[in-house]
Amino acid sequence: MAATREVQDHYFREARRLGYVARSAFKLKEILEKKNLIRPGDYVLDLGCAPGAWLQIACQHIGPAAKGGMVLGYDLKSVRRPLKFCDEALITREGDVFKVTSAEILELTNRRHFDLVMSDMMAATTGHHHSDHYQSMHLARRTLELAGDLLRSGGSFVVKVFEGAEYPALLDECKARFDKVKGFKPKASRNESTEMYIIGEGFLPAK
Ligand SMILES: C[S@@+](CC[C@H](N)C(=O)[O-])C[C@H]1O[C@@H](n2cnc3c(N)ncnc32)[C@H](O)[C@@H]1O
């Protein structure tokens, strides 16, 4: 069951107690408890990463810089550094995902591929279900487009959306690029929200 206000307060307090910058940390934690999408030494791209709770969870999973992995966070807003649990294996950059190119993202890491592309991006919500839904579809499709260029074969994908009329079509678009695709609603997500996370595993590069 998704979270009531009381449960949300619990996540807020837990985030503060544990040193996470936002309670969204628990959503990614739940996703990673369900699916082992980040291993030590992995390369992870986090789109819409500010203030940085998902970055913190990703850093904990890839391990210290000495293990060779990297987390790259990208957002319109800056991320306040240092960020607890993260060392120099974390790179953060400011910018708009609709303006940055895949080549520019790869240049930042000196790698050809990422193991996981994830996005918790959200434009300022309007409170109007349809607008929020279509905004989220636009962001999710951009994430899928970048993932198509940036993921290694077999890599993974997580994207936040607000459910609505276009959701089944987006699921089908994801199914065309990944071996396994599932929608997931974390317990840490608000009860009243239509927020869902699409998880894709086993990226199939275009032939
Ligand atoms: C819900 S917050 C992400 C929270 C983050 N996952 C965390 O755990 O701290 C959504 C973020 O998406 C970012 N965002 C929205 N549109 C964007 C865009 N076009 N390019 C880059 N970032 C964007 C916002 O600036 C905002 O920081």
Image (cartoon, rainbow, N blue to C red):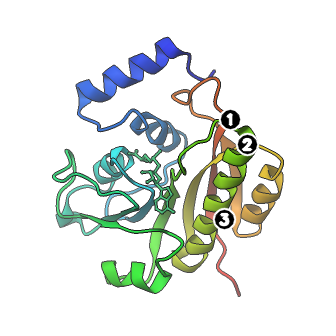
- Which residue is tagged 2? 163
Q: Position of residue 128 (x, y in %)?
A: 70, 38
Mark 2 near mark 1, Cβ–Cβ under 8 Å? Answer: yes
Residues at marks 3 and 1, CA–CA distance in whole angstroms: 18 Å
Residues at marks 2 and 1, CA–CA distance in whole angstroms: 5 Å
- The kind of residue on which mark 3 rests is Arg
Residue at the spot 58% in from the left edge and 42% down from the top edge:
125
Mark identifier at residue 14: none
Residue at the spot 24% in from the left edge and 24% down from the top edge:
17
Q: Position of residue 195 (x, y in %)?
A: 63, 38
The first of marks 2 and 1 along the sequence is 2
Quarter the N terminus occupies = top right
176 or 202: nearer the viewer? 176
Q: Quadrant of residue 44?
A: bottom left
Q: Please, what secondary structure does the residue beneath circle 3 have?
A: helix
- Which residue is tagged 1? 194
Q: Is the distance from the Cβ of mark 2 to the nearest ligand 1 atom less than 8 Å?
A: no
Which residue is most to the top?
A: 6
109 or 137: nearer the viewer? 137
- Which residue is tagged 3? 141
The first of marks 2 and 3 along the sequence is 3
Q: Quadrant of residue 20?
A: top left
The first of marks 3 and 1 along the sequence is 3
- Count every numbered label the image shows and give the total: 3
Q: Please, what secondary structure does the residue beneath circle 2 have?
A: loop
Q: Is the distance from the Cβ of mark 3 to the nearest ligand 1 atom less than 8 Å?
A: no
